[in-house]
Image (cartoon, rainbow, N blue to C red):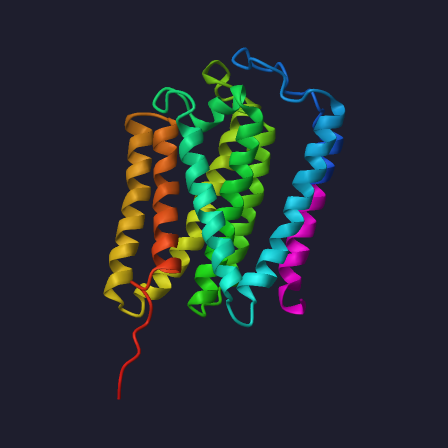
């Protein structure tokens, strides 16, 4: 447990800041009727809000456990593999289904969250855990140590909880503080989550591994494509899902296929 002490401290600090922010600065009904697009209250009552705060804080405290059990595992076990396969496909399936609950071209995941606030929270939980645990698994499987990558991914996943607790302001309230807080934290998750993957891929490219070079070019190209589409077409759930799908594909190929495994050279 000593090895993961710094990550335990990081997540405990973020959990404490999050708890204070939610309990002292965010009221349970702050955004319940803040937007005309919202068709129902986000929380049924204060008790439900406080339960959500407690549950989300507990989820924060699970992250250093993931670090200890995966990143610092003495040896990856079958249980590690099964757990990460489950988190990866749970995240992939859920964000895909969620993205099509409404018109994926007209609505963003955040705007859908105005109509399905609890599903949006589940989107946050599954997205964060699936990306985080599989980045850890990718590092450990390849005996790669990069604490910066883990820290960046940690901050990105924590930022998601600001995104879901400060809902989209909608197009009519663009550039408000609420909108900027929501968008900026969503962007932090996207950038830092991708950073954890890119850091690993670049390290493999430095070894002049052609397969990893091709995979890195693919992943970076997808990220650039998303940025171009955001500028040209605008935000939508379909466009937002593109980098997530690409990240899941990369994590699946590296973690659960032998395509990128090191081949032993026979004497």
Q: Residue at x 66, y 63 (%)?
A: 5
Percent coordinates x, y for residue 14 in the rendering: 66, 47
Nearer to us in this view, 267 or 18: 267
Q: Is residue 76 above or below residue 61?
A: below
Q: Residue at x 48, y 54 (%)?
A: 84
Q: Residue furthest top?
A: 36
Q: Residue at x 29, y 62 (%)?
A: 259
Secondary structure that dominates the magenta span: helix
Which quadrant is the C terminus positioned in?
Answer: bottom left
Residue range corresponding to the magenta coloring:
1-17
Residue 143 location, quadrant? bottom left
Percent coordinates x, y for residue 126 in the rendering: 52, 41
Q: Is residue 53 above or below residue 136?
A: above
Q: Can residue 187 be seen in this snapshot?
A: yes
Which quadrant is the N terminus positioned in?
Answer: bottom right
Percent coordinates x, y for residue 7 in the rendering: 62, 58
Q: Is residue 256 above or below residue 56?
A: below
Specify whether 6 is left or right of 226: right
Q: Can residue 181 be seen in this snapshot?
A: no
Specify whether 225 is left or right of 186: left
Magenta stretch encompasses residue 8: yes
């Amino acid at each position: 447990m000593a090895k993961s002490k710094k990550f335990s401290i990081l997540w405990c600090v973020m959990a404490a800041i999050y708890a204070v922010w939610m309990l002292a600065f965010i009221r349970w009904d702050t955004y319940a009727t803040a937007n005309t697009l919202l068709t129902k209250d986000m929380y049924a009552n204060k008790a439900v809000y406080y339960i959500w705060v407690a549950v989300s804080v507990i989820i924060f405290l699970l992250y250093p456990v993931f670090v200890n059990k995966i990143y610092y595992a003495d040896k990856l076990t079958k249980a590690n593999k099964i757990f990460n396969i489950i988190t990866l496909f749970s995240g992939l399936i859920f964000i895909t289904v969620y993205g099509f609950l409404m018109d994926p071209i007209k609505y963003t995941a955040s705007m859908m969250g105005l109509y399905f606030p609890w599903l949006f929270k589940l989107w946050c939980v599954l997205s964060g855990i699936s990306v985080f645990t599989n980045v850890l698994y990718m590092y450990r499987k390849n005996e790669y140590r990069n604490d910066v990558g883990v820290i960046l991914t940690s901050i990105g996943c924590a930022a998601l909880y600001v995104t879901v607790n400060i809902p989209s302001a909608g197009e009519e309230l663009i550039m408000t503080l609420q909108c900027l807080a929501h968008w900026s934290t969503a962007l932090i998750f996207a950038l830092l989550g991708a950073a954890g993957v890119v850091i690993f891929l670049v390290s493999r490219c430095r070894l002049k591994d052609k397969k990893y070079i091709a995979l890195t070019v693919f992943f970076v190209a997808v990220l650039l494509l998303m940025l171009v589409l955001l500028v040209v077409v605008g935000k939508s759930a379909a466009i937002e899902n593109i980098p997530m799908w690409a990240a899941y594909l990369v994590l699946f190929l590296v973690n659960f296929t032998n395509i990128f495994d090191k081949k032993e050279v026979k004497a």
